[in-house]
């Protein structure tokens, strides 16, 4: 009687670059001397939502606005609406590089098509804050400011920064269960260790945009646009 031969097959996982298309929204000022504000929405949101929020900031009409859509679509179970995220923990490093290249391409195209000047600020809400920071230090364009609402600084950003980060407005709701006071304090310590010029805004609400933040963001942007 013959004995079955036992074989062991080793499965190997590989990755390969693939072309995909992203979407971004632009609201120009009609002049080629306006600064550029680039925004990143939160998890389960869209670029349309982020652009709508940016447009509520006082003095925003002086800025060319660009809201970039995350590359990862999924259906919101409650409504069936297609929403986006920026990345998951799977293939994290590759996703970061893909996103950074994507953002750099968008900025180059917006400047080519609409003629915004060299002043550049990044804005992020929730999960979009991580993209804001990564873009600020790695996209290849000098960044003049960061608006960070309800999201923390990725651990790799201080290391990538080269010892310098742009002026920053760091904001959170006092009732925010995700971006806690402890996380904000840790971010402030990390930013100040790099001598970053940081202002803060805390408001009496949760994980949301708030009028107090809009006013603080308007003041922050006005100083850059002056």
Image: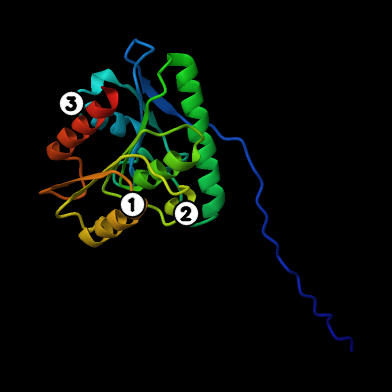
Q: Quadrant of residue 190?
A: bottom left
Name the residue located 28 percent from the left edge and 23 percent from the top edge: 225
- Residue 218, given in percent of the width and then of the height, sits at 20, 30
Mark 2 lies on residue: 159
**Lower position in the chain sequence, tag 2 or tag 3:** 3
- Residue 165, given in percent of the width and then of the height, sits at 39, 44
Label 2 crowd bin: few (<14), some (14–19), many (20+), radius 10 Å: few
How far apart are the alpha carbons under marks 3 and 1? 26 Å
- Residue 145, given in percent of the width and then of the height, sits at 33, 36
Q: Residue furthest left?
A: 204
Mark 1 lies on residue: 191
Name the residue located 34 percent from the left edge and 41 percent from the top edge: 80
Mark 3 lies on residue: 58
**Relative depth, front residue between 107 and 126:** 107
Q: How is the image coloured?
A: rainbow
Horizontal side, residue 30 vs residue 71: left or right:
left
How far apart are the alpha carbons under marks 1 and 2? 11 Å
**Lower position in the chain sequence, tag 3 or tag 1:** 3
In the displayed structure, 40 sits above or below 1; it is: above
């Amino acid at each position: 009687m013959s004995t079955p031969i036992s074989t062991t097959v080793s499965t190997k996982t590989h990755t390969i670059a693939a072309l995909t298309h992203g979407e971004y929204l632009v609201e120009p000022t009609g002049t080629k001397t306006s600064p550029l504000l680039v925004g990143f929405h939160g998890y389960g949101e869209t670029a349309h939502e982020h652009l709508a929020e940016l447009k509520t900031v006082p003095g925003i009409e002086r800025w060319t606005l660009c809201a970039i859509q995350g590359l990862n679509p999924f259906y919101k179970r409650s409504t069936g609406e297609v929403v986006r995220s920026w990345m998951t923990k799977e293939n994290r490093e590759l996703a970061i590089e893909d996103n950074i290249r994507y953002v750099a391409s968008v900025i180059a195209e917006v400047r080519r098509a609409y003629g915004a000047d060299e002043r550049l600020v990044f804005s992020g809400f929730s999960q979009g804050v991580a993209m804001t920071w990564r873009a600020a230090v790695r996209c290849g364009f000098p960044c003049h400011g960061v608006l960070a609402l309800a999201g923390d600084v990725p651990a790799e950003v201080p290391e990538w920064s080269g010892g310098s980060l742009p002026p920053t407005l760091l904001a959170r709701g006092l009732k925010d269960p995700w971006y806690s006071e402890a996380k904000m304090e840790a971010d402030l310590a990390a930013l100040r260790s790099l001598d970053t010029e940081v202002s803060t805004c805390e408001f009496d609400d949760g994980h949301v945009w708030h009028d107090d933040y809009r006013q603080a963001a308007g003041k922050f942007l006005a100083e850059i646009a002056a």
